[in-house]
Image (spheres, rainbow, N blue to C red):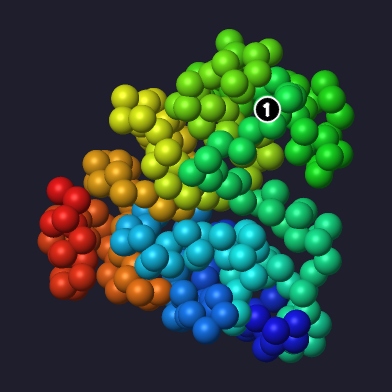
Amino acid sequence: MSTATSAPGGTGASTTDPIVRIIDLHKNFGPVEVLKGVDLEVRRGQVVVILGRSGSGKSTMLRCVNHLERPSSGTVIVDGEVIGYRIKGDKLHELPPAAIAKQRTKTGMVFQSYNLFPHMTVMENLIEAPRRVKGVDKATAMEDALQALEEVGMAHKADVYPSTLSGGQQQRVAIARALVMKPSVMLFDEPTSALDPELVGEVLNVMKRLATSGMTMIVVTHEIGFARSVADEVVFMSEGRLVENGPPSQVIDAPVHESTRTFIDSIL
């Protein structure tokens, strides 16, 4: 997206509007077009699972939602606010880094790798962003952090260092670190792909509990069982496009598009 681009229609959002709107999203890396006009809406409380082969654009799309990747064109709106840009007249102008960092507090991001600070305890990892980004006082930040750790079953590890934890435990701490910012939407980028098989379940169970609690979630994953049991909507992407979407019973169990059928058959 250039620094001055036509703004989308509308100036605000109601409670009935989608909490996330992705509009004609394109992303190029040099001459390679990774996203080719993606449109997607996610409503408050929905769990949307993104499926697709490696290189289909799933993670790039997710990273555009919180402006970790800058769209080449198109618009992302979260909770009524255009992400990465301010509207001036009928144009979009890119925000400064501090303003973008503030916007990112709306979207908790959980990556494949845990990205915990090794020199900080679990508690210190969790209170760092609330204190630095949101200006929360230490006592409140610690109280919020303990609550988030309880949600993921890791409160008893608050004072240990990440190196003493298993991969599954570290990923649960990473989820708590995202939750402590009290985001409107949780974004998961293949959160179990780096885990040993016996550790995958503990992370998926935490995600299932979040879904049950009403958390809005966009999840990139190959965990078909999770998608079938938790997702409200499943999206299949291929070669930078959204080719099929609908409830799990349709996209997973009775896919229409040939590329979706081939993919599902290959992993079941």
Q: Position of residue 33 (x, y in %)?
A: 48, 80
Q: Position of residue 69 (x, y in %)?
A: 61, 65
Count numbered badges in the picture: 1
* 58 sits to left or right of 130: left
> What residue does disc 1 label?
118
**Figure quadrant of residue 157:** top right
**Figure quadrant of residue 51:** bottom left
Look at label 1 and name its amino acid. Answer: Pro
Judge whether 9 appears above or below 199 on screen.
below
The reply to whether residue 17 is in sight is no
Q: Position of residue 121 (x, y in %)?
A: 70, 20
Judge whether 129 appears above or below 60 on screen.
above
**Residue depicted at x 16% and y 72%:** 258
Q: Position of residue 131 (x, y in %)?
A: 82, 35
The reply to whether residue 61 is in sight is yes
Judge whether 18 appears above or below 48 on screen.
below
The residue closer to the viewer here, 134 or 116, is 116
Which residue ends up furthest to the top in the rendered image? 156
Q: Residues within 10 Å of mark 1 (few under 14, many from 20)?
A: few
* 218 sits to left or right of 70: left
**Residue depicted at x 21% and y 66%:** 260
* 241 sits to left or right of 258: right
**Residue depicted at x 45% and y 41%:** 191
Judge whether 180 appears above or below 159 on screen.
below
Rendered-image quadrant of the N terminus:
bottom right
Provide the secondary structure element on which disc 1 rests: loop
**Figure quadrant of residue 249:** bottom left
**Residue depicted at x 59% and y 70%:** 76
